[in-house]
Amino acid sequence: MKNIVILISGRGSNMETVVRAAQAEQWPARIAAVISNRPDALGLAFADEHGIPTAVVANKEYPTREAFDAALRDVIDGYRPDLVVLAGFMRILTPAFVAHYEGRLLNIHPSLLPHFPGLHTHEQALASGMKEHGATVHFVTAELDHGPMVDQASVPVLPGDTAATLAARVLVQEHELYPRAIRWFIEDRLTIEHGKVHVDHSTKH
Ligand code: GAR
């Protein structure tokens, strides 16, 4: 049984789909905890209702990024994680934090990386005139939104799209993409070679 700790900052819809997939597909894993940096994160209620331990480590209560990350790391490690999943976790993490979880820290980012790292990805996609947009699951490294990519899903950018309509179209894909990628990790199908992720699609698992 592997332990998954999920970090959120808000709505938590990606966390929800991971929880539901883990239950429905009977992953050999447990969602050990859902942790938020914001006490008002809506997703905490869903985790509570599903009997998943929750914790809040409020970044506002720490004077520095390093102090916050150290406190967050202590709380996460209390759950003995095999995998830490960032699901709409809107804090930039320090290199020391990222190094501590090297190879077991995944993020989902709402763009087709390497396009549009950072914030406001849907606005950036519209402004650039891209005909395709999407989402990427990647291992987290010290460089923001640049780690080895596990998988991507794309959607068309349609005439008349707003950031909201485009975000909604991407989110539907995120909800398929992230549980699938996490399941691959849980099933030990992912290896990183020369900075690139190899997915073992053989059926021996
Ligand atoms: C998702 O679209 C996720 O890709 C994005 O925030 C949203 C969270 O929604 N993450 C980032 O922008 C990370 N930089 P959710 O809370 O409903 O899962």
Image (cartoon, rainbow, N blue to C red):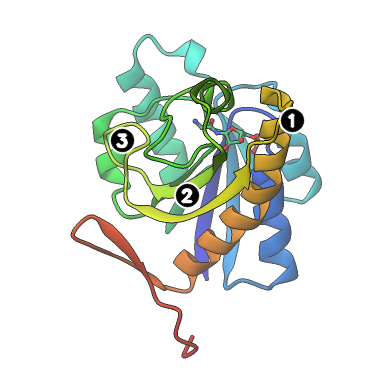
What residue is shown with label 2?
A: 137
Element on which disc 2 rests: strand
In the rendered view, tell whether residue 25 sits above or below residue 177.
below
Which residue is denoted by mark 3 in the rendering? 97
- Disc 3 to disc 2, C-alpha distance: 19 Å
Q: Does residue 28 appear to the left or right of 175 in the view shown?
A: left
Which is more N-terminal, label 3 or label 1?
A: 3
User: CB of residue at label 1: within 8 Å of ligand 1?
Assistant: no
Q: Residues within 10 Å of mark 3 (few under 14, many from 20)?
A: some
In the picture shown, does residue 19 fall above or below 25?
above
Q: Are marks 1 and 3 in contact (CB under 8 Å)?
A: no
Image side of residue 158 versus residue 2, left or right: right
The residue located at (58%, 25%) in the rendering is 126
How packed mark 1 is, by other alpha carbons closer than 10 Å (few <14, some 14-19, many 20 or more), is some
Q: How many marks?
A: 3
Instruction: Judge by depth and name the residue closer to the eye, 18 or 151.
Output: 151
Q: Nearer the viewer, mark 1 or mark 3?
A: 1
Residues at marks 1 and 3, CA–CA distance in whole angstroms: 34 Å
Residue 112 x %, y %: 47, 42
Where is residue 199 drawn, in percent x and y?
A: 40, 70
Q: Which residue: 69% across, 62% down?
A: 21
Ligand 1 found in image quarter: top right
Instruction: State the residue position of label 1.
Output: 165
What is the three-letter code of the residue carrying label 3?
A: Phe
Marks 1 and 2, the one that precedes in the sequence: 2
The residue lying toward the viewer, choosing from 40 and 167, is 167
Q: Amino acid at mark 1?
A: Thr
Q: Is residue 138 visible?
A: yes
Disc 2 residue type? Val
Residue density around tag 2, few if under 14, some if 14–19, many if 20 or more, within 10 Å: many
